[in-house]
Image (tube, helix red, strand yellow):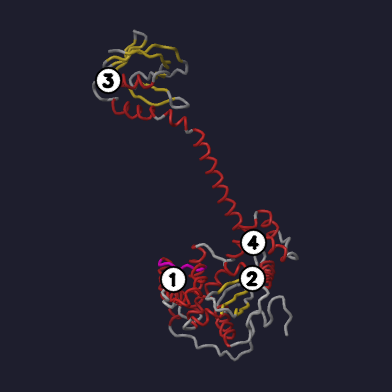
Amino acid sequence: MSKQFEARMYEAGSANSRLVVVTVETGRLIIDNSQVLSLDHMDVEVAGHEEDRIQLHDSQTGTAIMCMDRAHELLEALYDADTSGHLRKRASEIQKKVRSLPWMKGTYWLRVAGCLVAILVGLHFMIDAMIDIAADRVDPSLEKKIGEYCFNSGKKKYDRTSDNYKRIERIGKRLTGNLKNCPYQFNFYVDDTSVVNAYAFPGGFLVVNKGLIDKATSDDEIAGVMGHEIGHVIHRDTVHTMMHSAGVLCCVGMVAGLGGDYAREIAQALSVGRFLEGQSFSRAKEASCDLLGADLCAQSGYDAEGLAKFFQRMESSSDGTDNNKVVELLSDHPLDSARVDAIKAEVEKLKKVHPEWFATKHPPVPAAHPAVTTAGAHSPGKKKH
């Protein structure tokens, strides 16, 4: 049974069209009851701005026919009239698409909202990338002033006379002695607390808790943790985190060098200080510092896997009375199997590239020297006694 549809027909090579009546019959199309086109040479496509029209194209004559109404009926008629099966599969596929149009139109604003969200997310990551670039341009002298204020804001009295301090200072000097072109002067301190942790402030102020020293079974383990924290300073991780929290305007001021005399105000604006003691970093930053720490330990004659061994031992600790003391360490520095494997892979690579680092262990530096740091014996911001 034939069916008729209104359409516009475009002759081959012409941009002009004319209104015609298309009759669909078995195996053919009849245009205005005069021109006959075979379905064997016909292709069918979805057309129109809203994909609600059906376009037929005759490959033999180059004629194009745009049907503007009753798309469902036209596709059904083509499916039934195609005796050779040439158009059936394509007509069936288009039929499914046309049926989904009402739903697609109904979700138009939802899609618009999705596009806006995607744009905002893209801008977010773009701003993140810009802030990361800006953080690398902060002058180290300003970074040190901010770190000094943060360090002193806790008003803690750090141990700088005991054997623990001398041990930390000795390990720290050996590690930092292998840094190349480092803009920071590292200062080392011991916090007389039983909490197992270590942390670093911007500019090179590194604190190791007595609890961590007591839990460590060797200088290798302490060196592994300290090398990791030195990595946070070298990679400027705290500065990056601070500037991401600060906003663009504060970042611009810091990069422009406007904060030289306002380090305290900047630190307050960034909501830092003693809260940096519990600063957690992304897994990527933690893993990157693992590798730098392993390199420093290997160069300095310490076990390059000391960090991994220490953390694994803490995680497997069965002493319930001490578990609460290591929670802070494990929450700030979560060590998963991927990071352990990465450290081991780095060590294997170093053994091939720098076998001399692993030939012999350096003899320990005597702890009888005066307790001085790379930057001197006085606390930052304090007068030397």
Q: Residue 8 appears at what percent x and percent y? A: 43, 15
Q: How packed is label 3: few (under 14 Cα within 10 Å), some, or many (20 or more)?
A: some
Separation of residues labelled 4 and 1 (CA atoms): 29 Å
Residue 236: in magenta span = no
Q: Quarter of the image holding residue 133? A: bottom right
Q: Earlier in the sequence, mark 3 or mark 1?
A: 3
Q: Looking at the picture, which amino acid does disc 2 mark?
A: Gly
Which quadrant would the N terminus be assigned to in this image?
Answer: top left
The numbered mark at residue 245 is none
- Residue tagged by mark 1? 343
Which quadrant would the C terminus be assigned to in this image?
Answer: bottom right
* Kind of element beneath mark 1: helix
Q: Earlier in the sequence, mark 2 or mark 4?
A: 4
Q: Earlier in the sequence, mark 4 or mark 1?
A: 4
* Kind of element beneath mark 4: loop
* Kind of element beneath mark 3: helix
Q: Earlier in the sequence, mark 3 or mark 4?
A: 3
Separation of residues labelled 3 and 2 (CA atoms): 79 Å
Q: Which residues are magenta?
A: 332-337
- Residue drawn at the location 52% of the way across and 88% of the way down: 364
| Residue that extends furthest to the front in the rendered view of this protein | 321
The numbered mark at residue 137 is 4
Q: Quarter of the image holding residue 204? A: bottom right
The numbered mark at residue 203 is 2
- Residue tagged by mark 3? 80
Separation of residues labelled 1 and 2 (CA atoms): 26 Å
Separation of residues labelled 3 and 1 (CA atoms): 67 Å
Between marks 2 and 4 in the image, the one whose residue lies nearer the viewer: 2
- For the residues bearing labels 2 and 4, Cβ distance under 8 angstroms: no
